[in-house]
Amino acid sequence: MTFFNKVLICFLLLSGSAFSQKLQQAAFQVVPLGVKGGIDEKNLSAYLLAPAKTNDYICLDAGTVNAGIEKAIEKKTFKISTSEVLRKYIKGYLISHAHLDHVSGLIINSPADSSKTVYATGKCMEMMENHYFNDQTWANFGDQGPGLPLKKYHFQTLTPNEETPVTNTTMAVKAFPLSHVNPFESTAFLIRNGDNYALYLGDTGPDEVEKSTHLKELWAAIAPLVKNKQLKGIFIEVSFPNEQPDKFLFGHLTPNYLMKELHVLEELAGKDTLKGFKIIVTHLKPPNKNISKIKEQLKSQNDLGVQLIYPEQGKRFDL
């Protein structure tokens, strides 16, 4: 073999390796501020999502904010103060629905926060304005609604299935309705950065129990992104183990129902498209024995070969 051929082979190998690494580079970074459902007020649904290698985070729900930031600092995920993360890194909030375990951190931390945008669908925004930021339950830190709006937050109502830019980031969001104890609505957020996507679902029951088609319509919308490997992961709740009777699901999923729904997605996206796909399991409800049982059941029922991720409060991971 000539010297030139050896050099050429080395170049091709290195180029191939670099190309492979580029393909595997993360598109998003995630810092969970709260991961549970239920009674732990220091660890309720809230996930910071940003394009990779940036600090331009959007907060997906806001059940726990301050305690989650402190936990992230404790774990050296952030190396600045709690106040700086809150005021500078969090560029806005996407609120899936107005139940307290998804908004309490936003409400309590609003006096210390900086000006930014809160995004939600019409019904959710109406509930927050009428019941929380109403100058009675809490000061109105918004720019509309009852009482004297203090105009710290810009309340932006999302129109379902229409993409909206996320202010002060390179991201955009599209909202999809979910059923959370029909007819109460929750929301799924499809977040785009360039050609990459992440999907976050607020609380949702299965279509079968909710007598709804919301999840099937969502799966149909994202199936092409799964097929083309543009969707980097799905945040989706599993609140109860399989033993929970349907009449006591209260608009939530079990391992059995999650896997049924993911099979619907795979049918739409194509065989084996979910193999190795990242499913971030959210909203597990205490007690801990139930959480352990949920994890065991998901592992045993995972016939699609998805990568199950259980986020840890304050610990960053990539998508």
Image: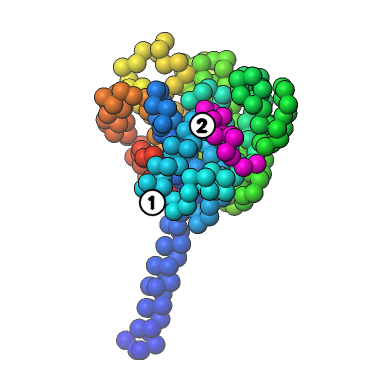
Neighbour tally class for label 1: few under 14, some 14-19, many 20 plus, Cα within 10 Å:
few
Q: Residue at x 59, y 52 (%)?
A: 194
Q: Which residues are magenta?
A: 103-115
Q: Is residue 233 visible?
A: no
Helix, strand or loop for disc 1: loop
Q: Is residue 148 visible?
A: yes
- The image quadrant of residue 303 is top left
Q: Is residue 109 magenta?
A: yes
Farthest-out residue, top: 247
Q: Is residue 94 magenta?
A: no
Q: Is residue 118 above or below residue 288?
A: below
- Give, as a three-letter code, the residue at label 1: Lys
Q: Is residue 160 above or below residue 305?
A: above
- The image quadrant of residue 162 is top right
Q: Nearer the viewer, residue 34 or 16?
A: 34
Q: Nearer the viewer, residue 256 or 61?
A: 61
- Give, as a three-letter code, the residue at label 2: Gly
- The image quadrant of residue 14 is bottom left
Residue indicated by mark 2: 105
- Cα separation between marks 2 and 1: 21 Å
Q: Residue at x 66, y 22 (%)?
A: 135
